[in-house]
Amino acid sequence: MLDTLLYLLWTVIKIMMIVVPLIIAVAFYTYFERKVIGSMQIRVGPSRVGPLGLLQPFADVLKLLLKEIILPANANRFLFVLAPVIVLAPAFAAWAVVPFSDLLVLADVDAGLIYVLALTSLGVYGVIIAGWASNSKYAFLGAMRSAAQTVSYEISMGFALVGVLIMGGTLNLREIVLAQQGGIFDWFWLPLLPLFVIYMISGLAETNRAPFDVAEGESEIVAGFHVEYSGAAFAVFFLAEYANMILISGLTAILFAGGWLSPFESVPVLGDTVLGEGSILWFLAKTVVFMFMFLWYRATFPRYRYDQIMRLGWKVLIPITLVWVMLAAIMVVFGLVVRGS
Amino acid sequence: MIVQELIFYAYAVVLVLAASMVITVRNPVYAVLFLVLTFFSAAAIWMLLEAEFLAIVLVVVYVGAVMVLFLFVVMMLDINLVPLKEGFIRYLPVAILVAIAMAVELLMVLWSKGRFGTDMFPLPAPNPVGHSNTRALGELLYSNYLLPFEVAGVVLLVAIIAAIALTLRKRTGIKIQDPGQQVRTRSEDSVRLVKMKPEKPPGV
């Protein structure tokens, strides 16, 4: 019994060791976003609170926590309060199977890849419930848009993952990374280049980020599904959106960019030094690169029109993934790609 | 393992409660949400049976996709519940009869000693460490049951094509963009640069 309790306690500590840095990362991601987009638009960005404006996220959090949470009179109270929690929980729970390095993984489960797919597809419930429970036109429109968009892009995202699964020969995320050993040209981004691009596009659509942010669409439907939320409840939606972006970035790093592996692994001289060793630092560096790309897209592209989003998802991305999944299978069967070389 | 039993009973209770709420709540949106909870609890129980692949696929397919579309439709439609409830009292006796018959059948199976009772089936041994549920399923599907699997695939394909054929209709008189044509457009096609002398202002 004591063993079980100790095991539980140790697991809770490990969960905290993932969740607490994640929340801090979300806080600084918002700062990073404002600075990056600021410099892309030749502005300064936040610069007043603390040195270089570094304390700005904490000022924002404090402001949101001190604000009043307004419950609309005709809202469905229970679901209205439940919705932000439903958005947030999968965004955090998916980190359970993410391997940070060869040994650093909370749950090294065999079905890690579909577990992640299942959890990323659950977040949309929070959005739909928020839109419906708010009892507001704009919120409801945002929820409907989000539901249709998520279901459409989940298919191409799932097929992109099938390509990775065929290449890696396993559903275990740690083993998928190990199958990519051998340096930057052995990572799956090269043989699966179209799927890599499609995964990132679908990731944008799944997280409702620009240019696919029609669920929010502040110029058309005010703020979409979270228009009625204020204070801490709004902060939870915000937290979930950024946690999801970090999750998709981390997953892209694991599935297509070799996770914790070093890009110089098989380079003659460099590979024997410390730079050639895989470590969590490589994983974090790759994740930050993909996180930066999320911001880059936002500063670059205007919002898609809704029918064009649907056309892109169903008529462009899904056919490409279908073809490339078959090509990936051919590459594996004829030994054109060697796992873990 | 007592922890496993506790988890099982917790999820089983949630499952049964949620399933009965699906058919009793008045609001159809609530009914769909309870159905989601039912699927989720069922997935958790499958997980306890070490069928992790099936459990997660249940969540991906039903919770992640099918039920989202259900919610989508139920929220869009303004369903009038009164006609749906009209026949309730009339059909109640038949329903109770069917329910009792099924309950008796279940109890006869579960409690009959020596035939189907729980005493006839030993507890399944837990799978060895490193056993991959997904691999085992795949090996069975692609070797022993290849033909039924392929036939099911073909049936699904026919269903997809039929669904598309049923909903596809050509409408006239609406404006549709051709993205290929839009991409091919060059500025020379629509903009003409004209060289002309600057006009003299009057009175110079």
Image (cartoon, coloured by chain):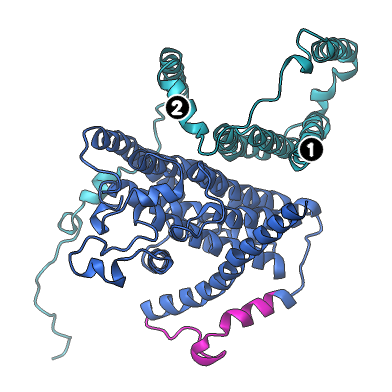
| Residue range of the region highlighted in magenta in the rendering | A41-64
Label 1: how many Cα within 10 Å (few below 14, some 14–19, many 20+): some
What residue does disc 1 label?
A: B14
In the image: residue B198, left or right of residue A15: left
Q: Earlier in the sequence, mark 2 or mark 1?
A: 1
What residue does disc 2 label?
A: B138
Asked if residue A94 can be seen in this view, the reply is yes
Residue A286 percent across, percent down from the top left: 38, 65
Tag 2 subunit: B
Q: Residue at x 36, y 77 (%)?
A: A40
Q: Which chain is blue?
A: A
B129 and A306: which is toward the camera: B129
Residue type beneath disc 2: Gly
In the picture as drawn, the residue positioned furthest to the top comes out as B115
| Real-space CA distance between mark 2 and mark 1, rounded to the nearest whole angstrom | 31 Å
- On screen, A172 above or below A82? above
Tag 1 subunit: B
A340 and B177: which is toward the camera: A340
- On screen, A309 above or below A331? below
Write down the colour of chain B: cyan
In the image: residue B43, left or right of residue B141: right
